[in-house]
Every structure is written in C-alpha cells, then in structure tokens.
C-alpha cells in the first residue's frame, strides 16, 4: 500500500469534511471489511490529543463503528490500528462467531494491534503505542480471572505480549 497516496486521498476527504467517506476508504483500501459491519457513525471527540472508537450493536447483530470527527487529525498508522481494533470487534460480535466475554474480545483486539495476525496489511505503531496497547492487553488478560480457563487459553499470547513489551527500547 502506498501511504503517500492514501494520505493524499484522506487529505482530500478531510478538506471536504467527508470523514465517514474517508473511514470507508480505509476499510476498502486495507481490506478490513466484514459482513457484520453496518457502517460508521460519529461519536463525541475526547480531545485534540486523544481518540476513542467503539463498535456498537447487540452481540450477534450488525455493528456500527463510532468514530470522532477528528479521527484523521492523528497519525495514519495509529488510526489504522484503532479502526482494525474495532473491525475485529465487528467480527467477534458476528452471528455464529460471537465471543461473549468482553475481556477476551479486548485481549484479542489489543493483541491484534501488536502482532497483526488477522490484518497483516495494517502497519505497526510507534514503540510508545506498542507499550500502551501491550499494557491494555495484559490488563484485560488479568481481568479474565487468575488461572481461569480463559487465561489458560491465552497464556502463550500473554507471554508474547510480555516479551514484546520487555524488548522495546
């Protein structure tokens, strides 16, 4: 993927205040789509320096990904990882594939932001963000319950996350 061209397209969308179209362009350009994706909508902006995206909808039902209007004011690699995180939730909540436990969904999504197993086309984020996302993955892992079946299921991935964090400069 030519990031220079992607940024040019995104700048054009931003210039015309076509934020939802820009988000859809990313979904198409980076092959992030899924049948359970119901589209994008707007949510309140947190601040000029932080963002929050959410996948909203009933488990087993279509999911809307809610984005702030200032989404494209942030680094493209970070934006792509945030969108991919939510698109993984879209898949996790799809009929026949529902992952009911929120801690499991979040652990999987933060793990994906670090290792890009589902979306290998998504670029890596900065070491700062890897450390942050790794910390979030471990937080959700710990919430699964000490030595629970879920923790046992993800023990190997937890070790991968810890190793990554410990090898960051």
Image: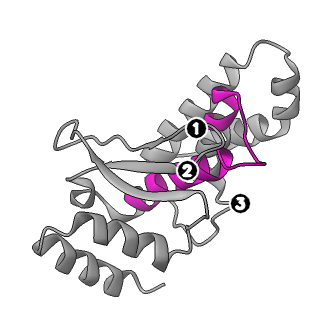
Residue 31 quadrant: bottom right
Q: Nearer the viewer, mark 3 or mark 1?
A: 3
- Label 3 sits on a secondary structure element that is loop
Residue at image coords 25%, 83%: 8
In the image, residue 27 sits, relative to residue 62, either above or below, namely below
Q: In the visual, does 111 lie left or right of 15?
A: right
Residue bearing mark 3: 117
Residue at image coords 56%, 67%: 33
Q: Residue 130: where, in percent of width, then height? A: 52, 46
In the image, residue 79 sits, relative to residue 16, either above or below, namely above
| Nearest to the observer: residue 49 or residue 168 | 49
Q: Residue 27: where, in percent of width, then height? A: 47, 70
Q: Is tag 2's residue or tag 1's residue first in the polypeptide sequence?
A: 2
Q: In the visual, does 95 lie left or right of 154?
A: left
Range covered by the magenta-colored residues: 79-106
- State whether the magenta stretch is mostly helix, strand or loop: helix
Residue bearing mark 2: 62
Q: Is tag 3's residue or tag 1's residue first in the polypeptide sequence?
A: 3
Q: Is residue 50 visible?
A: yes
Residue bearing mark 1: 134
Q: Within 10 angstroms of label 2, few (less than 14), some, or many (20 or more) residues?
A: many
In the image, residue 157 sits, relative to residue 152, either above or below, namely below
Magenta region includes residue 94: yes
- Label 2 sits on a secondary structure element that is loop
- Label 1 sits on a secondary structure element that is helix
Q: Nearer the viewer, mark 2 or mark 1?
A: 2
Q: In the visual, does 57 lie left or right of 44?
A: right
């Amino acid at each position: 993927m030519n990031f220079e061209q992607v940024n040019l397209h995104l700048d054009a969308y931003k210039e015309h205040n076509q934020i939802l179209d820009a988000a859809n362009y990313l979904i198409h350009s980076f092959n992030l789509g899924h049948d359970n994706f119901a589209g994008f909508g707007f949510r309140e902006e947190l601040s000029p320096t932080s963002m929050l995206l959410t996948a909203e909808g009933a488990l087993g039902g279509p999911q809307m990904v809610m984005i702030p209007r200032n989404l494209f004011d942030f680094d493209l690699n970070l934006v792509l990882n945030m969108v991919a995180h939510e698109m993984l939730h879209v898949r996790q909540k799809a009929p026949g594939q529902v992952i009911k436990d929120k801690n499991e969904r979040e652990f999987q999504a933060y793990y994906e932001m670090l290792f890009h197993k589902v979306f290998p086309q998504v670029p890596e984020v900065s070491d700062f963000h890897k450390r942050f996302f790794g910390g979030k993955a471990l937080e959700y892992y710990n919430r699964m319950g000490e030595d629970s079946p879920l923790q046992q299921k993800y023990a190997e991935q937890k070790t991968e996350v810890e190793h990554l964090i410990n090898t960051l400069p």
